[in-house]
Amino acid sequence: MAEELKNTKEFIVSDQNHLAMIVGAQDEFIGILEAGLDVSINVFGNSLKVSGEKETSVDTTITILENILNLIEKGISINSSDFVSALNMAENGTLEYFSDLYDQVLIKDAKNRAVRVKTFGQRQYVQAIRNHDIVFGIGPAGTGKTYLAVVMAIAAYKKGIVDRIVLTRPAVEAGESLGFLPGDLKDKVDPYLRPIYDALHAILGSEHTERLMDRGIIEIAPLAYMRGRTLDNAFVILDEAQNTTSSQMKMFLTRLGFGSKMIVNGDISQIDLPRHAKSGLVSAQGILQNIDQIEFVNFSSKDVVRHPVVSKIINAYDANSL
């Protein structure tokens, strides 16, 4: 009992509304901290009592709560991903830079909420997109690669930097042979491009997305339809690039035209190609490393902004594959 009291600290929040924001609906947010740091957090009046076996875990929890409260007091809306990000930065020893991530708004989404980077990896990625013609984002699911690429594409279009947005993805499951599927081209391709649609709808709204697609400002097509084209003044995103062959990757990259940017995203741990085929994304890492205006940004499980258990799942599978 004495040990428990020794490792119990109190965090006082004078504003009840701020306290409610920190706790989250049904204690969702403090639950993330409890799971990630192996502590217990209880609400008493206007304070949170944090208890744990390790004093360092309790101290880290208090520091995270201080950082979150600082954001709330600045009028920044928070959600579960902010807590996950703080946990990851605490683990990396970079928590002191947590508030710096919130200094810049990339864009406002369809619900007028500010979109910001959530991790150091994401900040590297965004900076690379701003400063390079071609950027490769390589890493596991949940790191925000596709979402941020779409955010940057829409921001570039709104600023008049590009005239259109081209989104593509290899349809590996259909072997790039889409003709036997029912419907028109859009119907055939949609199942493979759902994550891209989700990002567009989150940022623009479904109706605005459809209007821009009808006007040809946003184009969504399978990778096979990129052959023979030159894309000028366009922001081009290739998603699921681990499922391209080397020849497909070369074909795609050589579509780059004047005034354009290309983003190539993929997860080399999730390759669905036939066993004899080498991933074009894996090959590109070795072939293109030393070319100016091409940047590679590698994400890890520490950049995952989904539920903390997702990072643990990724790490467990990575350890099992060694």
Image (spheres, rainbow, N blue to C red):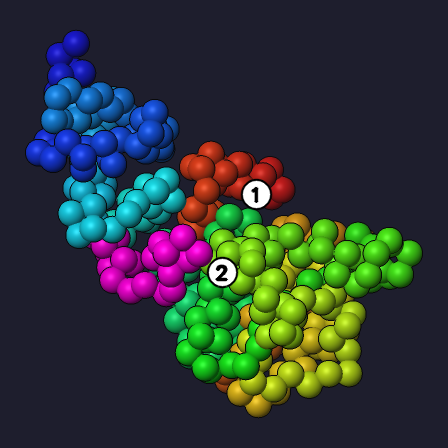
Quarter holding the C terminus is: top right
- Give me the C-alpha separation between circle 2 and circle 1: 35 Å
At label 1, which amino acid type do we have? Asp
Residue farthest along the top direction in this orientation: 1
Q: Quadrant of residue 155?
A: bottom left
- Mark 2 and mark 1 residues within 8 Å of each other at the beta carbon: no
The image shows residue 298, relative to residue 92, as above or below, that is below
Residue 121 visible? The answer is no
Could you tell me residue 223's position as x and y percent?
73, 68
Residue 204 numbered mark, or none: 2
Horizontal side of 115 relative to 229 (left or right) equals: left
Mark 2 and mark 1 lie on one chain; the one further toward the N terminus is: 2
Quarter holding the N terminus is: top left
Residue 318 numbered mark, or none: 1
Could you tell me residue 60's position as x and y percent?
22, 37
Horizontal side of 78 relative to 110 (left or right) equals: left
Q: Say few, some or many: other residues with alpha carbon within 10 Å of mark 2 (under 14 / 14 to 19 / 20 or more).
A: some
Which range of residues does the magenta coloring cover? 96-114
Secondary element at tag 2: helix
Could you tell me residue 89's position as x and y percent?
31, 48
The image shows residue 173, relative to residue 253, as above or below, that is above
Query: Foreground residue, 37 or 223?
Result: 223
Horizontal side of 274 relative to 165 (left or right) equals: right
At label 2, which amino acid type do we have? Leu
Determine the residue positioned at 28% across, 47% down. 77
